[in-house]
Image (cartoon, rainbow, N blue to C red):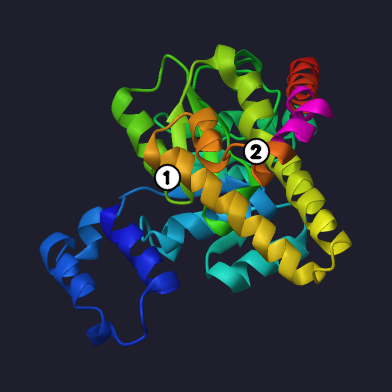
Amino acid sequence: MCWALLLQWQSHFAPQNKEENPLLLQWQSHFAPQNKEDFMLDKMIGFIGAGNMGSAMIGGILDASLVTTSQIIASAHSPETLDKIRTKFSIETTQSNEVVAERSDILFLAVKPNKFSEVLPQIKGHLKPDCIVVSIAAGQPIANIEALLGEVRLIRAMPNTPALVGAAMSALCPNDKVTPEEVKLVESLFNSFGRAEVVPESMMDAVVGVSGSSPAYVYMFIEAMADAAVADGMPRAMAYELAAQTVYGSAKMVLETGKHPGELKDMVCSPAGTTIEAVRVLEEKGLRSAVIEGQMACVKKAREL
């Protein structure tokens, strides 16, 4: 994983000429594996469903060099979708869900929840005995999936759309047939396109609210900040860049400093200054309450699915 993260960092931030960065070369010489194949998985990975989320997950797994293109197979209902991912990733594709199930050591169910009653009976008799099934559908408890598939190694997962840029937050919940080693294996796949956390199933609806759906809330906040900047005369493209980078940097501060968000907020607020005045108005207008109530409504809806 360290090697995969280094490659990702290098592709985004490192200079084109590695000789310009001796520190990077020193890091590579001490920590990089002599052979990247040492970090590859000897597993066949299948995807039933290859839309935006499935495609993002495939891209992350391949970018991290966890498997080769020959170790991934995907199915989708639409021939256009299959053509798109086959061209983009050079993986094997098929319209047969049964074929994907028969070939997979780890099988991702990346179809919409309303398709489960159709798709799962198709593959029930085609799974390998030791296959690990990973469902990324919202509102589908482990018990519901087991009722359709029978006794299987099953992990219920909830990633989010930042997987499209390798920055997902995913929650994983295994059933009692999955071993700790198998959980770690699947966790490494999710870590290839962001971060992953193992949680009890009782928290999965809360996960939908706090990370699964919350990118939409954050986009609204970025949009509102940009609208205010445009109203004050800033070009819109510049406003989006400033607002988005500020949200990104603020989130990074929370993750990397370990400080409470309230403490980080107070560090920006000087007495009688501009920031505390903005905070006062945001509290007055109910920002905190609106976020809490909206997120709780999201969780309620998830429980009703």
Task: Find numbered disc 1 in the image and state the secondary structure of the residue it sits on.
Answer: helix
Q: Amino acid at mark 1?
A: Asn
Where is residue 232 shown, x and y percent of the image? 84, 62
Q: Residues within 10 Å of mark 2 (few under 14, many from 20)?
A: few
- Earlier sequence position, callout 2 versus callout 1: 1
Where is residue 161 shown, x and y percent of the image? 65, 47
Give the camera-side residue of 159 and 73.
159
| Residue 104 visible at all | no
The dot on residue 259 is none
Instruction: Indicate whether 32 appears above or below 250.
Output: below
| Residue 243 visible at all | yes
Residues at circles 2 and 1 in contact by the CB criterion of under 8 Å: no
Question: Is 282 one of the magenta-colored residues?
Answer: yes
Would you name the residue on which mark 2 appears?
272
Would you name the residue on which mark 1 appears?
191
| The residue stretch that appears in magenta | 279-289
> Going 54% across and 68% down the picture, which residue do you hit?
89
| Res 230 → quadrant | bottom right
> Going 14% across and 70% down the picture, which residue do you hit?
26
| Res 278 → quadrant | top right
Where is residue 49 shown, x and y percent of the image? 67, 47
Instruction: Indicate whether 56 appears above or below 217.
Output: below
